[in-house]
Image (cartoon, rainbow, N blue to C red):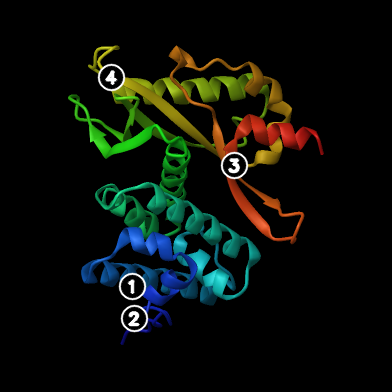
Amino acid sequence: MSTEIKFPWAKDIEPHFQFYIPSMLNILTPSKKQIRCIEKKYTNRYNMHRDAIIANGFFEAETTIFELLWQAKEGDINSLAFLRFIEKICSSLISKLEIVQINKLRQTCYQAVINFERSKSKYLCYIGELASLERILSRNEHKLIDVEYKIPNGKCFDFAIEINSMLHLIEVQNIFLNSEAMEEEENFRKFMEKRFIDKLVNKTDGIPEKAYSFALLPILWGEFNKLKKYINFFQTFKPPKNIVLPLMMISSFENIENGDIEFSFMDVKQYLYFLTRK
């Protein structure tokens, strides 16, 4: 006999999305099949946590949208703040895009919601893509043409953007910092340069250099408090071939007016500037 415990939301997941992240749900517009898939994944996730608690008294797992919703319902201020951040991004994208363009983001939102296996999750990568696109489109002359734009070598760029009648391809590069890479500045520099070069070579292999206008938009994830000692790197770093856009990050801060925790998508150099002024 199965000992599976049904996750309490499993047959009624949409109201929770509607309450916390209605704009993401609006973009996603899930089919009945997708809803069933989400319910199954979330029930399995709940059972994984239940089994870990029974065996160990606790569970450890990377956060997913599932955990954010669960913790938000229990009043966790950081989860509530990050869900507000996701909602703000998605709401802004809806306001900037036509319905045909919004539909191109459905798969990105769907992957953000379900992309996890056991403890591993890639949802931050998809949230990073949405945040990057929202920042790109904050300039009125930038227009979204396509998502996952395929080039002749079979590789895809995250976004094809029209700027002043010219097509530009942009790849969001999520870079997860590890402790070894952050031991000293020279290690950090080599780590970052290798990531950029490897990504560029992978994406443009076999493509003539001037065939497309393309750029990387890197997002750093990790222990940001350790970045302060590398402020010189960020001030002097010259990206390879000048096709790497400013390094970005998602940071949290306390709103001085109401004390709420808020998340912001910002330039790493801007973050370090504020950090050094504290």
**Separation (CA) of disc 2 from disc 1:** 7 Å
Of pointers 4 and 3, the one earlier in the residue sequence: 4
Looking at the image, is 150 positioned above or below residue 123? above
Structural distance between the alpha carbons of marks 1 and 4? 41 Å
* Mark sitting on residue 11: 2
Asked if residue 117 shows in the view, the reply is no
Q: Earlier in the sequence, mark 1 or mark 4?
A: 1
Q: Which residue is mark 1?
A: 39
Q: Which residue is mark 3?
A: 222
Q: Secondary structure at mark 4?
A: loop
Whichever of labels 2 and 1 marks the residue nearer the N terminus, that label is: 2
Q: Dividing the image into 4 quarters, which one contains the N terminus? A: bottom left
Q: Which residue is mark 4?
A: 212
Q: CA distance from mark 3 to mark 1?
A: 30 Å
| Nearer the camera: disc 4 or disc 2 | 4
Measured as percent of width and height from the top left, residue 115 is found at 36, 55
Residue 47 x %, y %: 42, 74
Mark 4–mark 3 distance (CA, rounded to whole Å):
32 Å
Secondary structure at badge 2 equals loop
